[in-house]
Amino acid sequence: MIFLKNDYSLGAHPAVLEALVNTNMELHDGYCEDEYCRKAADKIREMIEWPEADVHYIPGGTLTNLTALAAFLLRPHWSVISADSGHICVHETGAIEATGHKINHVKTSDGKLRPEDIEEVMIFHEDEHYVLPKAIYISQATETGLVYTKEELMALRACCNRHGLYIYLDGARLPMAMASEKNNTEFTDLPQLCDAFYFGGTKCGAMFGEALVIINNDLKEDMRFLVKQRGGLLAKGRLMGVQFDALFEGGRYLDLGAHAVRMANTLAKGIAEKGYEFYVPQETNMAFVMFPKDLAEFLATKVMFETYPVVTETHQCIRLVTSWGTTQKEIEAFLSLI
Amino acid sequence: MIFLKNDYSLGAHPAVLEALVNTNMELHDGYCEDEYCRKAADKIREMIEWPEADVHYIPGGTLTNLTALAAFLLRPHWSVISADSGHICVHETGAIEATGHKINHVKTSDGKLRPEDIEEVMIFHEDEHYVLPKAIYISQATETGLVYTKEELMALRACCNRHGLYIYLDGARLPMAMASEKNNTEFTDLPQLCDAFYFGGTKCGAMFGEALVIINNDLKEDMRFLVKQRGGLLAKGRLMGVQFDALFEGGRYLDLGAHAVRMANTLAKGIAEKGYEFYVPQETNMAFVMFPKDLAEFLATKVMFETYPVVTETHQCIRLVTSWGTTQKEIEAFLSLI
Amino acid sequence: MIFLKNDYSLGAHPAVLEALVNTNMELHDGYCEDEYCRKAADKIREMIEWPEADVHYIPGGTLTNLTALAAFLLRPHWSVISADSGHICVHETGAIEATGHKINHVKTSDGKLRPEDIEEVMIFHEDEHYVLPKAIYISQATETGLVYTKEELMALRACCNRHGLYIYLDGARLPMAMASEKNNTEFTDLPQLCDAFYFGGTKCGAMFGEALVIINNDLKEDMRFLVKQRGGLLAKGRLMGVQFDALFEGGRYLDLGAHAVRMANTLAKGIAEKGYEFYVPQETNMAFVMFPKDLAEFLATKVMFETYPVVTETHQCIRLVTSWGTTQKEIEAFLSLI
Amino acid sequence: MIFLKNDYSLGAHPAVLEALVNTNMELHDGYCEDEYCRKAADKIREMIEWPEADVHYIPGGTLTNLTALAAFLLRPHWSVISADSGHICVHETGAIEATGHKINHVKTSDGKLRPEDIEEVMIFHEDEHYVLPKAIYISQATETGLVYTKEELMALRACCNRHGLYIYLDGARLPMAMASEKNNTEFTDLPQLCDAFYFGGTKCGAMFGEALVIINNDLKEDMRFLVKQRGGLLAKGRLMGVQFDALFEGGRYLDLGAHAVRMANTLAKGIAEKGYEFYVPQETNMAFVMFPKDLAEFLATKVMFETYPVVTETHQCIRLVTSWGTTQKEIEAFLSLI
């Protein structure tokens, strides 16, 4: 079977695995207070050119989101604005609400939040009978693999500054966004553009773990308490330090993202050349393609993928995802099937 | 000034006040375990012809909603479906989310939830990555004063039964709904149509307090613990028993609702005769009228009302509300102004 | 039956009731934004000589405590220290924990929290594996009717200042504490001694309602949002304004407390003279007396009271409570029984 | 430096690491729905001879505890009873309270909960003004390394059955408890003795991860929703399946525990022979020893350990911990120092 189902089924990138193996019998302080966690954090501060950034390692994306937003939304009546297709809105089983906070859902055409969406929410929320929006949640890339341009992010920043809103950026697939042809931001832009964000590990070469980066000083205080309280402070936290240290070595992190996107570009180009249509433009490592239903059924016997809940009388949308481990050969094999 | 601003600014209906005065120096058990609370509960059970109903008295609408829904949504991943104009969605400062539960917001054309809205939510929520909808929230009448017909409520019931969803009905303005010309349900239908609901007191003649009625046995257990935990179990709970006992005496409760609706009917008829348009049909004790802007401004000098955030280049929507205390004279005075 | 069961079974003091009756048909803005709420707040600011105090009206003690502490404990890992006999620890069905915060219980000999208790908690809570205590909860008078002296409160204040802890004082029975012979604080001392406190209404002459007073500016922001979110912002909030306005008129509030304490003093003196022993010293409006079991049984046929869970082989502790409505005649009648 | 600081600083046992390496490039379904998770779960069901058990993998102990207890404590007013030295009481930063539930702390002499402790709590909690205890939390071994005997566990079971309380057993160090000379329970006893428990991975040979085992059918429903909502459902859940599969192979799990305990026994025997006293009896892989202060200071230059907050004028308590990786040579080296 050709595997185009997701970007989180493989284990760790070989270099990451090797680092874990090599350091396995070392004895270090627990709870992310070891030298690997420090080294990886130093690399992050260097990559983003922001020496004051705080870094916390948390073993998964949902846990990172709910913990980080608990730091943003300290007052019980503060809420976070998100596109209604945002991961925190739909795919996290009410994790944010379970911490007591409302998400202000915004209907968007393409999953990207824009200043006008925020303005509309803010106008409506005027007094103590409403929640008080205090942050926005965006992800780079979005759930359907779209990329915010630098101009779009700057417009969000300006809008949020006007309204006193924090910006939290979910970077589960940050290196894939960075490698997109649409992208014109760099890591060094991030501290200006958001108040906190995370470097995704799980989908970007790590075995597990995400690296939460806090820029805004307001959000730094007592963050370790929050990570611990929500269950994210691992005794063997150093495992995440070791992995990110290996991932950030010599530009590997971006390279892995770039590989995934290159594979997706080739895939999409081949599909487009054969005349199939895309439900959403392919910009990163995902392609959403409308295939004739019988072709979709045939493909399912040869390829592992997920269907997407968009169906016409004749066509079915399917989602194809590449990763750091996808090979040129797999892409070619897929293209030969259609 | 003519007062058409809301239905909660007056104190208690004189008969309710008299009952409070007459019983003021009596000594009773605390926490709603007194004879007045029992008597009023008995009257409710009789009115709805449901001898097994449990009744709890809670001092306000938001507190009643958040407490009742905490009983419906016992598991942390259970959510409640509501029209996005529902009171719990917008006007309760995230009170439901503060108890840890997500509200599934549904965009509706008129604030009324329909089976197709529910179906759409249910299809989408398929596994453990999503919350599990377990209840719906409706209010009778709705925020803009519309009434669910019996057929509409029965269709909701059938849909909810198919999906294992509880129905919670917010009855802040229940007697006004009952008195509407559109209405064809009776109190005795309610136990079939919902799992719990409340008889509004605050807007219907009481000084304060709502009477939560629980029909479904699943929801009865330990309800007093929940009421206490959320702060709704008043030491002098008997005050609410006394008030509802007086309100339910001799059909007074429905009479007060009917008076308010009669006043609104007269008002709306007069407005329509003068050729003004309604933003929402007037069915209960509220009229949403599009007035020319200069007339709206003039009215504001003679009448207390609230503007509604619907504006055209030439017109402004204003909300006019009648209550058990509104007089024919006030209505006539208003009509003479336009 | 002689009634010595509690201080919350009577309705409102006649003067309070009269104020409610007289203002019943007035039309005011909702949600505590009316002139009565403002007038009562002004009276409070005058009484405590603290013009900057914020005042919020909330319909019950548990709801006041959970809402106020939600303002103190804004960060999820912040906790509140309380004597383990404190009302929030035992009698509020986990209301504080239901808002997500831990209470650090402290075992005390008499229900009074002391600096050494706080020190012990603080030493133990040293890093992010523990909650971070951020406030203390005390009540004046305590659950067993004891009074903190000014010296004791000043010692707590000094200790809390050292550790950055807020002080919240539950004043459900504040006028009774003020009227105690042991008391040497005045209302004007309170702003120095605590960061927020409430003037109890329910047990002190009101029909219902408590007046939360916020001194510390840190705690003021957005308090109306919190009151609304927890369900305490009543549409007819003015009812509480009217009541407190009447209660604070001409020293009535303190007078009512003084009456209750005078009755309890007489009661206790009479009991002591007959040679019975007290489980806790009588300082305010409660007496905890060890009566021979057969006498306790006899009394139960003539007097309404509550037993207290302290029993020896021969004696049973019973709790006797006086209120603003207790009469000299009732006290004499009781004393004639023993 | 000799390392006797904790049992979680090493990485994975070599056999576990090898399994991770060997399966690294395999492609599996995400979220613990892969064959390794199934295989490990099958091994668990066999080990405990309970074919109906459900197994969930969660990446850390605190996260496991808070998620499992959220399944036990479904109603907001339900609480859990724990010794006040229990991990959930002190070392998890209020994680349980952050889910909205109270912990009933019980003072114990040695960290072990006993039926009489439970009885005392239950008598006190009588109505809706109190939380309703619904579960107990125990850990095997306890925080100070003590072991519950089978008789003690059966007595707890009987007591809990009488009161309708669930039993949750924290097994962070379960194999060490099983290997203790004091132990007389077997894995097959656990389903009778508790309603859910977890096999600790982090401290018992795994890189990370705990295996939560649910016995009681009441607690099984929708557990995956809860795990997801709290952030514990890892995309690469199979990593935990692979590790536990390797740990449970050929009795390895118990062997690793037994090694740690053997090392601690040797250590403690040597210490005792030299005449030092123990603060707590050494029963598993921890020894709490009272050393003269100057010896303690000297040891700190040669050995990594933690001090324990018990100090006399002349002595300091230090905690020595062994693990699956501790060697006989290290123990001898330590003993030669004293």
Image (tube, coloured by chain):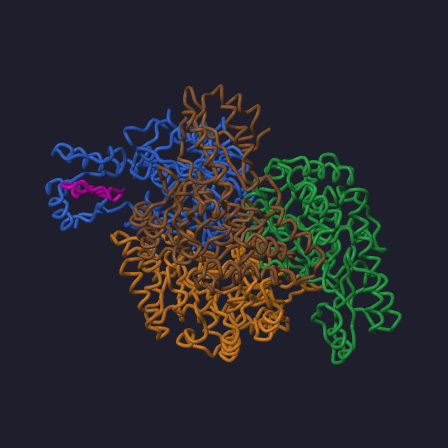
Chain colours: A orange, B green, C brown, D blue
The residue range painted magenta reads D309-330
Residue C43 visible in the current orientation: yes
Q: Please state if D291 lies on the left or on the right of C28 as rendered.
A: left
Q: Looking at the picture, does residue C3 appear above or below residue A252?
A: above
- Identify which residue is drawn at 74% across, 49% down: B159
Depth check, front residue: B211 or B236: B236
Residue A221 placement (x, y as % from top left): 37, 62
Q: Please state if A94 lies on the left or on the right of A43 as rendered.
A: right
Residue D317 is covered by the magenta coloring: yes
Q: Looking at the picture, does residue B82 appear above or below residue A183?
A: above
Residue B299 placement (x, y as % from top left): 76, 74
Direction right: furthest residue: B273
Depth check, front residue: A149 or D119: D119
- Check the picture and name the quadrant holding the C terminus of chain A: bottom right
Residue A59 visible in the current orientation: no
Residue D276 is covered by the magenta coloring: no
